[in-house]
Image (cartoon, grey):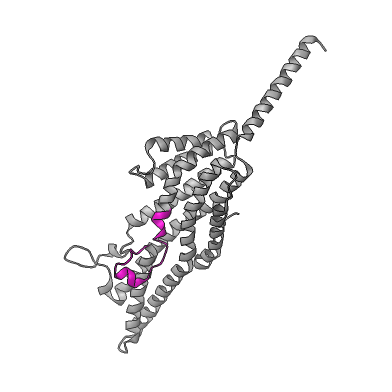
Amino acid sequence: MKLQSIRFFVRQVCRLASYTMLSSTLISCGLSTTQRDAISTFTPAGSSLGDVLSKQFVGARDSVIELNTCLLTLAPDLVPKTAQPPRKFDRSHLDDALTADRIGNYVKASDLLKSYSDAIDALVNDTQQAELNDASKELTAAIRSYDSNKKLIGDDGLTAIGSAVVAGGTLLVEHKKLKALTTIVPLTDPVITDISTLLSNDVVVHDPDDILNKKVKGGIFDEVNLTALKVAAAADHILNDPKSSLVDRDTAVGCRNKSVRAIDNVTSIQEKLHASVLGVAKAHSQIVIKLKDDSIDIEDIKSFAVKLKDLQPVLKAVSGSGLKVHL
């Protein structure tokens, strides 16, 4: 072998060794196995919770409209009227307190939770760069839609989050992932906490008397229950009246069944859904700490994922379809 060839071979070996050492150093500075496990446990549960909440809020409004349609037949005087005189029935008021704007705000919060979880999941699981670009755009749009007043995340913070998602998929992956996550997760934590606080009151059922006496503020599930109770009372009034016609009785039975089904659905799901909404904030805060201190356990994150798994059969029983949550 000529001297020139030997020198070339040595240079190539040295370059390969240097690259291997650099790669090893960067990998060692990347996500640890337990950090990756923590995020991979949180993200599918967070995404599923966002999806579940969005569907439940829209479903609650649909349920109230259906129940008020029953009231229109059974007891028109109990149907919500326009606020300004002359107070009269307006079909647009069938949603009562669950207006499109109110439900829209909760759907924004739910969609943001899903978009965030999906973006973090894509970042950790070696997603293609084009998909990360899309995830970045979707996440930043969802944050600004929810936090339009910029109280939780300012423009600089939002730009940092969007850039970090994209940068996390470039070369030197493991090193970039950790750097991206240590930017995104802490900046987003106040938003996740805000969502949990906002929604927690709306997925728990209060005593109807406490709501009517204004001891507590009724949530979205409470609106379903209160409307269903009105329908049940109106139906019972017709069924207990011996002068009621067969047609009226048949209508009353159908409406009463709808009211019972609405209350049963809320009762079945609310406790586990409420626990999940409270759990998401604790779990996310633990990820923030985990990225700084790898030695801590991830019990809150595991607990959150289990809550979503426990929710699945309840959702399946109520709606006929469950959402898979991977542990």
Foreground of the two, 54 or 36: 36
Q: Residue furthest top?
A: 3
256 up-or-down from 101: above or below: below
Looking at the image, is 297 positioned above or below residue 252?
A: above
Q: Quadrant of the N terminus?
A: top right
* Residue 16 image-quadrant placement: top right
Membership of 297 in magenta stretch: no
- For image coordinates 36% across by 78% down, the residue present is 251
Front residue of 28 and 130:
28
Quick one: quadrant of the C terminus? bottom right
Q: Nearer the viewer, residue 235 or 48?
A: 48
Residue 92 spot, x, y in % from top left: 28, 62
Who's the residue at 32% across and 59% down the image? 99
15 relative position to 35: left or right: right
Vertical arrangement, residue 260 with respect to residue 184, above or below: below
Looking at the image, can residue 129 be seen? Answer: no
- Kindly give the residue lying farthest to the left in the view shown: 85
Question: Can you see residue 186?
Answer: yes
Image height of 249 relative to 94, above or below:
below
Residue nearest the viewer, comparing 103 with 154? 154
Residue 216: percent from left, percent from top: 33, 65
Residue name at image x 30 percent, y 88 percent: 243
Which residues are the magenta region?
196-219
Quarter of the figure with residue 196: bottom left
